[in-house]
């Protein structure tokens, strides 16, 4: 997740760790705490793997370094953008990072990512609708547990419907923009 974020943020301009942390904090909001202790090791790893260069700024008395993406880093960025998003705790953040970098991709690639997200949302809706439908058969749950679970399931369905509506809206925008530029 951090690899995609860093490569996407430095794709078109160099940036220092302080600003990367600030941008990342704004991206993830209050859902996750961001520390230099997690960011700087990732920068070091990316540099070691030849994906970025950390360049000391000559005109800065604090010896600040800026991250600069390499050709290998650009290749890795495109690989990460087109990889399927694994279903794990970082799924939402990964998609959000991808959505924030769609401008670097072709129209077809943008639509592919948006369609994958839409499909995930459809599957989530179907799964939660099935759970809600079968809830009355769950004899191992008390009625109050069932009621609470139904509410949470309803929330998940509403969130996924909103995500699906958003994805379809952006797919239409991307498609219409591509038609206008032809």
Image (cartoon, rainbow, N blue to C red):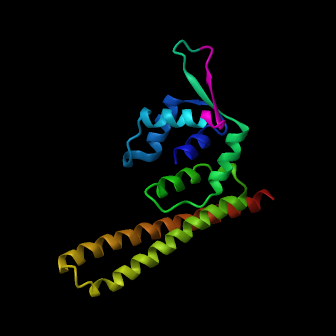
Q: Is residue 56 highlighted in magenta?
A: yes
Q: Is residue 129 left or right of residue 14?
A: left
Q: Is residue 102 visible?
A: no
Q: Residue at x 70, y 36 (%)?
A: 70
| Residue, far right | 182
Quadrant of the rendered image containing residue 157: bottom left
Whether residue 15 is in magenta: the answer is no
Residue at the front extreme, as displayed: 48
The quadrant in which the C terminus is found is: bottom right
Residue occupying image coordinates x 51% and y 31%: 19
Percent across and percent down for residue 31 are 38, 49
Return the x and y of residue 132 as percentages of the image width and height: 34, 80
* Count of marks overlaid on the render: 0
157 over 60 or under it: above or below: below
Query: Furthest residue to the bottom?
Result: 137
Q: Position of residue 124 (x, y in %)?
A: 46, 72
Question: Can residue 98 be seen in the rendering of this structure?
Answer: yes
- Asked whether, in this view, residue 144 is left or right of residue 82, the answer is left
Image position of 151 with respect to 111: above or below? below
Give the extent of the magenta segment: 47-59
On the image, the x and y values in percent for residue 113 come to: 62, 61
Residue drawn where x is 49% and y is 63% of the image: 87
Residue found 52% across the figure and 30% down from its top:
17
């Amino acid at each position: 997740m951090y690899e995609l974020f860093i490569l996407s943020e430095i794709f078109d301009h160099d940036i220092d760790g302080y600003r990367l942390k600030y941008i990342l904090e704004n991206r993830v909001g209050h859902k996750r705490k961001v520390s230099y202790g997690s960011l700087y090791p990732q920068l070091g790893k990316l540099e070691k793997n030849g994906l970025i260069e950390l360049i000391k700024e000559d005109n800065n008395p604090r010896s600040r370094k800026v991250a600069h993406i390499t050709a290998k880093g650009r290749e890795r960025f495109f690989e990460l953008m087109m990889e399927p998003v694994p279903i794990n705790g970082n799924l939402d953040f990964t998609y959000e990072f991808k959505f924030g970098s769609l401008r670097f991709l072709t129209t077809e690639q943008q639509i592919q990512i948006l369609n994958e997200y839409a499909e995930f949302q459809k599957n989530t809706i179907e799964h939660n609708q099935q759970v809600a439908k079968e809830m009355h058969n769950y004899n191992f749950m008390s009625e109050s547990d069932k009621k609470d679970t139904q509410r949470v399931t309803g929330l998940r369905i509403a969130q996924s419907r909103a995500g699906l509506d958003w994805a379809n809206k952006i797919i239409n925008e991307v498609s219409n923009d591509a038609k206008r530029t032809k």
